[in-house]
Image (cartoon, grey):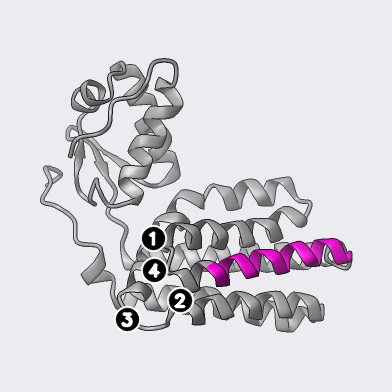
Amino acid sequence: MVLKALSRGTSRDGALETVRNAILNNLLKPGTQLKQSEIANQLGVSQSVVRESLSHLAEEGLVESVPFKGMFVRRLTTRDVEEIYQLRACLESLAARLALPHLRQSSRMGELKGLVARIAEAARAGDRDALIQSDLDFHRYIVKLSGNSRLLKTWESLLAQSRYLLTYLYAIELAGLGESLVDNAANHKDVMDSLESADISRINGTIEEHMHSAALRLMEHWEEISVGVEDARS
């Protein structure tokens, strides 16, 4: 895998973004060893910049450090999938409850409906990148409206792994396996409708089902989609 060299002046953020995107787009597959010297040479940056980038990606859950072996693209397991969606369900249920007073403003609900429309538009176009971004924008909007900065920070700590899982989830749906992209977009409308109803029980149930359904679809096809490479960890 050859990484694109960076222009001068963007080395720190550019290195992080380049390696992150290579992992999220499966150009650096699960299990791949990340050698600092090789990445530094390909990107045209110092090894210290690469080391800092890999440490940040380890905090995001995309990279893992194996003692006496080095840094590797992390292999997520079905257990990871389950835990991530369980935690998101809890965080977003709480966020939705806290966001309800703000959603009573028509402009806020209008913004939420606009985000659902963007998801539906991307689904109809079969645009996976736009789907991933609009999906995360929708959920982040609800969490941000909670007004709880620590809740938002905790949710954002899962952002890289959530994006990684959505990449696989939409790949499954684009391949015609399980739920369609349009059905997935409809699920987001269900979440929005539950928020508009202001019924806490309905909101919790809808968000729980939304997350549980996504996790199940991923776990059903996980062995097919998470194939990595042989690595030097063992």
- Camera-near label (2 vs 4) is 2
Q: CA distance from mark 2 to mark 1?
A: 13 Å
On residue 177, which mark appears?
3
**Residue bounds of the magenta highlight:** 105-121
- Give the mark nearer the N terminus: 1 vs 3: 1
Q: Is residue 88 left or right of residue 105?
A: left
Q: Is residue 81 left or right of residue 225?
A: right
Q: Quarter of the image for the N terminus: give it.
A: top left
Task: Assess disc 2: are there few (<14), some (14-19) or many (≥20) residues with their C-alpha within 10 Å of its C-alpha.
Answer: many
Type of residue at label 2? Leu
- Camera-near label (2 vs 1) is 2
**Percent x, y of residue 133:** 52, 56
What kind of secondary structure does the magenta stretch mostly adopt? helix
- Residue 30's place in the image compared with 115, above or below, is above
**Percent x, y of residue 104:** 88, 68
Task: Assess disc 1: are there few (<14), some (14-19) or many (≥20) residues with their C-alpha within 10 Å of its C-alpha.
Answer: some
Residue at position x 82%, y 67% in the image: 100
Q: CA distance from mark 3 to mark 2?
A: 10 Å
- Give the mark nearer the N terminus: 2 vs 1: 1
